[in-house]
Image (cartoon, coloured by chain):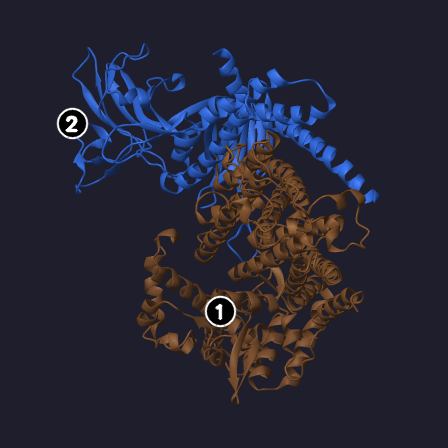
Chain colours: A brown, B blue
Amino acid sequence: MKKWLPWILTVVMAGWALSTLRPSKQTGFKTDEFAKLPVLMNGRFQPFDSVARNSLLQIRARQTVPVEENGRSRKLPARDWLVEVLMKPEQADDRKIFRIDNVELISLLKLTEEQKYYTFTEIRPQYDEIGRQAERIQKIEAANRTPFERELMKLYSATALYQRLKLSLKPPNTDDFAAEVSAYETSIAPGVAAVRAREAGKEFDKAAFDRLLRFMSGYDSVARFALPLTIPSPHPEEGREKWLNMGQGLLDGLHHQHGLPPAATYYATMVSAYRQNDPASFNRAVEEYRGWLAKDFAPELRKANHEFFFNHAQVFLDAMVLYVFALILALGSLLTFGMFANLSEALRRSAYWIIVVGCIIHTIGLVYRMVLEGRPPVTNLYSSAIFIGWAAVILGLFLERIYRIGIGSVVAACVGFITLIIAHNLAVGGDTMEMMRAVLDTNFWLATHVVTITLGYSAMFVAGLLAILFIVLGVFTPMLSKKLTAGDPAKAAPAEAGKSEVGVVLTKMVYGIICFATLFSFVGTVLGGIWADQSWGRFWGWDPKENGALMIVIWCAVILHARWGKIIKERGLMVLAIIGNMVTAFSWFGVNMLGIGLHSYGFMDAAFKWLMIFNATQVCFIILGFLPLRVWKSYPGIAPASPSPSGPAGGKAAPAPAGA
Amino acid sequence: MLDRLIKIFTSLRLTIVLLSLGMILVFWGTLAQVTLGLYKAQNDFFRSFFVFWSPEGSDWQIPIFPGGYLIGGLLLINLLAAHTRYYRPSKKKIGIVFIHFGVVLLLVGQLLTDFLSVESTLHLREGETKNYSEASRSFELAVVDVTDRDLEKQVAISHRRLSKQDEIKHPELPFTLKATTFFANSELKQREEPGFQPVKGVKGIGEGVWMRELPHETMMDRRDVPTAVVEISGPEGSPQSYLASAHIARPQSFQYGDRTYEISMRPVRYYKPFSMHLLEFTHDRYPGTQIPKNFSSRVILNRPETGEKREVLIYMNNPLRYWGETYYQSSFDTDDQGSYLQVVRNPSWLTPYFSCVLVSIGLTIQFLMHLVPFLKRRLAT
């Protein structure tokens, strides 16, 4: 059984991960198919599905909307919600999607305090008031706003986005949009003739003139506010990116002999079918439109399909689940280390292989994103979290492959899990594949500077976590003083490694990883300087992000020199490595919160709280590390050490009897 | 005594102390940018020997922490001293030597950059031609003899000199100048407002203007705008005063004797033996958004002395390097019809490139020297 456990667990987990990829069968309105249609938004081609998810994330911080239907509650997926917003906005207005926590804001909007989420119908009476307040607050710098003002601005941009989405496919107050569009189409020729006649001062058909104008004024507001560009470029040979929004597409029909853009008609048919609750027509219109797109817009259609698949697969979520599971197994392996050798080894191997599966999924996700975006792996804070986790997992697996004591797995699973959680929360900001601003629009520097510096972060976190493990295992378990082979006497461990204690091996790991971190942080920092020299004319400008990177380099240098000068020993090294965690976290996240400099992403309240919590935990570990060695369970035989002159240098991993 | 000094300066402990202090300084200096602004924080923390602290309401300057120059300088001494004393040629140390030599080059290079580099801005509207760039933070009082338009004679007086508010004589000028009022940073109004004082006794555009002094500006995206009331006096005629302010772009002309002069407060100019003519500025955005995709300026570079005349495209991440200067696309006018080029003259711009190569080689050697045998041992079993 114990021999087979790792295999069974790995296969089950891999099977589960694969099963999440299977597309679900839809009956009725095939909103899945609709959600795969390409549109142009935020400067890039994406499926409606991404528009739906990112918009809902920005408004509701979730990718679903809970609804009550016939007494049962279910979750409305983002794409269904978007279809409703675009086609039946009056129904969407009653969905509870706007989250308001601030009491002052609730009272300003004259709402009741009992709920977390409010519908647009509830907010509508005070909608103008929100606009008035926002106009005032916009003039205040983001960092200086009060919680009320920040919350109001959030609601303001959420409602603005929502309102624009509502106008993205159809004008307000239109029921049978398909009939209206075809009426509009027939009114164009007589209407245009009437307009020309009037301009020429001749007699004109007043009825045809008014009719056309009525249509046009409705479409004008759609042209001004519609958000995603839904109508493919009328002349793809002149520019594939010159897409129009619905309103512009309808008005564009005025200038052309060949009538309205086909896409406008297809969308109008979908709107009517959806409003008349006619799934068959809806599905047919979607299918026909896809067929039409396949002729001239095959690449965009393909890209949207791929992105839809990627959104749907949620690979990083799968990887996250696998990492958590593996983390529990690996910790179990550590706890049973040296006591139940066989069980410990079975758990260790299970954890290792499940992390390998997780890492493969993680890698697929990372590469898929790169291909979709056409960019190197790190382009923003979100993707940096994914990449840091990925690199740390690889490093951890590498350590595990060499030492086979479960510690590498704990590190891999832990950093992998935490960074993916961070990425998951960063995604709430909206589109994670946003376009790069002008200065950053260079794949060469993104691939070199950004990737190396991020690898440096990864290594620092791995070293810091190893250090935490050293202290926690040392204080609470006897593990550090055990021989490597203690886990499984039968295991064919490397002869030389078998002789050393876990504590000594951990120290070697931390030292090696810090060397790795120094290499990458330094090279990355200097490459950043060279990039800055190329684009702004100065190698070094003391910009906060640059300073953060410099702090990592300096700190690595401090650790390495202190180690070489024998000023610190094991424990000192560990404490310094944990401080390295804080330095890295500051460099990665903290500087962005200062709200200044060229790398500023705006002030992030929630992230600041978590950064402080992280720092607090690191300080706790450091204090734990300073406990006198005699209370460390790993070194029970050691007499109270004479106080060392250099503080943290007190660590003495003197060989203690392993079987004590 | 000397032995002890040598021992201190070559010790590894000093290295560690200095590096740790350096990290604290960088951290502190970064946080200080929030309140002081990038420019001032840079000068206070990194381009200084000490970080000073002034108790509330006093002029005392108490040094409380070593500044960038002190830490960097001591590190340099420490590094060089340790190497001269302990260095024994050996294959094992070659990586370390590369690294340390690279770091020395980096520190020296940055010090040189600090002292030698000159930054200025070239603002061109479409169709405009200029043969000078302008400093972004320092101003000068320009007095130009325009009696003969083809043979203009310029005299520029730096705003530092002007701020001393004493009599200024120049061989090219038949009169003396004196700033009777000088505000390093100022605001002007057309009518009376609380806190403003009237500009008295001046001719020209300054009549009826109200002014006030503002505190020194520390934010990176803002700058001081000096204003002065300049008195012109000499043997001919009675003294006359003019308001010269960087708020007022257009020069004011006045007569002295039989000659006509123009006076203005303008950013310090750096003249060049060639001119730049902006043909077109382009600002590309991603479709359907306001996110900038690219900025580029198409200019004609014209250098009469060599007959060189050619078209150049300057855009993001692609500067023009010419005449020992580098021209970067840095900003633009809000109507997208004018372009700002950042002009940098930095004789030591190549040092970071060399030091980067040196340190990277050194680090890679060191890392591989440890990793390869380690892996060999591990994987052999």
Circle 2 SS class: loop
- Mark 2 and mark 1: span between their CA atoms? 64 Å
Horizontally, residue B228 falls left or right of residue A590, namely left
Q: Relative to A370, say whether A167 is above or below.
A: below
Residue A641 percent across, percent down from the top left = 54, 39
Q: Would residue B132 be seen by someone viewing this image from the given angle?
A: no
- Tell me if residue B327 comes above or below residue A220 in the rendering: above
- The mark total stands at 2
In the image: residue B200, left or right of residue A7: left
Badge 2 and badge 1 in a common chain: no
Residue type at mark 1: give it: Arg
- For the residues labelled 2 and 1, say whether their Cβ atoms are less than 8 Å apart: no
- Residue underneath mark 1: A60
Nearest-to-viewer mark from 2 and 1: 1
The C terminus of chain B: image quadrant = top right
Residue at (59, 26) in percent of width and height: B103
Seen from the viewer's position, the closer of residues A502 and A140 is A502
Q: Is residue A484 above or below residue A181?
A: above
From the top left corner, tell me how far across and down residue B355 is, in percent.
Answer: 62, 27
Specify few, some or many for label 1: CA neighbours under 10 Å numbering under 14, 14-19, or 20 or more: many
Q: Position of residue A287 (x, y in %)?
A: 69, 76
Instruction: Identify which amino acid the numbered label 2 is placed on.
Output: Gly
Q: Chain of mark 1?
A: A
Which residue bears the numbered disc 2? B201
